[in-house]
């Protein structure tokens, strides 16, 4: 790569709606500005909400149809296609189980093809591994990560999992805690930053920031808030496939008029402070960024134990 060229970075995601891992990736992309060229691939072509948070000066493309698919059965043909595609980049960043086929392709063909280094990130588990790790996935991760340059995790629990269940050497594992710009949350929130929310006298606003996915168990949060009656409203900032299930639960409990679903909203520092009580209802979390943001804004937090790992 010539010194005047931007490094080309390939990002492999299972989905690219704005959650913890996507927020961190986008913040880094925005920090680098025009100094790197980014290509983002999502296994779920419809989950692209985090795209809106990438600043305009960041060179970034989303060649969904031109790139191989991250979905499909393991196979040499698919993996060879991915290895050839990776040859066009200087660095590969992969995220969570949904990108593991890309990691396996890199592991299999790196000895025979000139492939860039790969850094894999694991941020937690979906609902299918929230209570118990999948032994087959553990073995697959062990094999696929054998040639990764590094494995990045945000929590002590995931570090222990990487050392034990995934049999990764200490030298490969890097625990990097999630962090935010705390000073940004010390400023007063913008009063109209959450569409549809105008606080009433004596009213309590419970809120959360989350991708609307099954592992977040947001119907549980709707159920909990519904029990407190008319003086409590619920705000869920985020987007995802569970939106309809959340709405159905709110209608069934007679609190649809007390639920606000504004979708994805950028820059949480502008609106987190409008919430009175921050709540997390997830089945599984690892050092959630939204919890750190709530703490920075000085909010009391109600959380399931799963979010504290």
Image: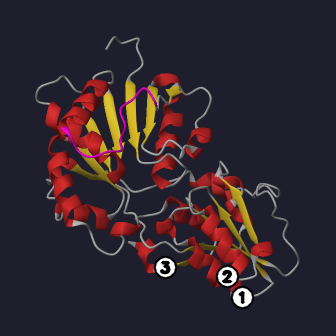
Q: Are marks 1 and 2 in contact (CB under 8 Å)?
A: yes
Residue 142 percent coordinates (x, y): 16, 53
Q: Residue at x 87, y 74 (%)?
A: 200
Would you say 195 lies left or right of 93 here? right
Residue 193 percent coordinates (x, y): 77, 54
Sequence-earlier tag: 3 or 2: 2
Q: Residue at x 17, y 39 (%)?
A: 107
User: Would you place residue 182 above or below residue 116 in this image?
Assistant: below
Residue on which disc 2 sits: 225
Task: Please tell me how crowded label 1 is: few (under 14), some (14-19), or many (20+) other residues with Cα within 10 Å.
Answer: few
Would you say 12 lies left or right of 277 here? left
Front tag of 3 and 2: 2
User: If the image is split into quadrants, where does the C terminus sit?
Assistant: bottom left
User: Would you place residue 271 above or below residue 75 in this image?
Assistant: below
- Image disc number at residue 304: 3
How many numbered marks does the figure carry?
3
User: Would you place residue 308 above or below residue 143 in this image?
Assistant: below
Secondary structure type for disc 2: helix
Task: Please tell me how crowded label 2 is: few (under 14), some (14-19), or many (20+) other residues with Cα within 10 Å.
Answer: many
Residue 162 percent coordinates (x, y): 22, 59
Rounded to the nearest angstrom, the CA distance separating label 3 from label 2 is 14 Å
Would you say 193 lies left or right of 149 here? right
Magenta segment boundaries in residue numbering:
65-75
Which of 289/103 is in front? 103
Q: Is residue 297 visible?
A: no
Rounded to the nearest angstrom, the CA distance separating label 1 from label 2 is 6 Å
User: Would you place residue 72 above or below residue 225 in this image?
Assistant: above
Main SS type for the magenta part?
Answer: loop
- Image disc number at residue 228: 1
Which of 306/242 is in front? 242
């Amino acid at each position: 790569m010539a010194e005047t060229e931007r490094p080309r970075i390939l990002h492999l995601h299972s989905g690219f709606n704005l959650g913890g891992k996507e927020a961190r990736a986008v913040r880094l992309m925005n920090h680098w500005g025009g100094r790197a060229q980014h290509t983002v691939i999502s296994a779920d072509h419809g989950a692209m909400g985090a795209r809106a948070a990438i600043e305009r000066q960041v060179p970034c493309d989303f060649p969904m149809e031109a790139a191989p698919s991250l979905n499909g059965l393991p196979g040499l043909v698919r993996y060879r296609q991915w290895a050839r595609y990776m040859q066009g980049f200087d660095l590969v960043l992969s995220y969570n189980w949904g990108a593991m086929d890309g990691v396996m392709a890199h592991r299999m063909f790196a000895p025979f093809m000139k492939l860039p280094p790969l850094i894999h990130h694991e941020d937690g588990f979906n609902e299918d591994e929230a209570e118990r790790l999948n032994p087959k996935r553990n073995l697959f991760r062990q094999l696929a990560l054998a040639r990764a340059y590094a494995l990045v995790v945000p929590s002590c629990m995931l570090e222990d999992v990487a050392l034990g269940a995934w049999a990764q050497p200490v030298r490969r594992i890097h625990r990097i805690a999630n962090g935010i710009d705390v000073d940004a949350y010390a400023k007063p929130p913008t009063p109209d930053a959450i569409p549809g929310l105008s606080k009433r006298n004596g009213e309590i606003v419970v809120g959360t920031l989350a991708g609307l996915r099954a592992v977040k168990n947001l119907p549980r949060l709707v159920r909990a808030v519904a029990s407190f009656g008319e003086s409590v409203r619920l705000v869920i900032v985020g987007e995802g496939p569970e939106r309809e299930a959340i709405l159905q639960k709110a209608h069934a409990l007679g609190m649809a008029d007390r639920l606000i679903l504004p979708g994805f909203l950028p820059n949480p520092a502008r609106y987190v402070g409008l919430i009175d009580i921050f709540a997390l209802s997830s089945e599984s979390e690892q050092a959630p960024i939204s919890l750190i943001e709530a703490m920075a804004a000085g909010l009391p937090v109600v959380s399931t134990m799963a979010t504290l790992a």
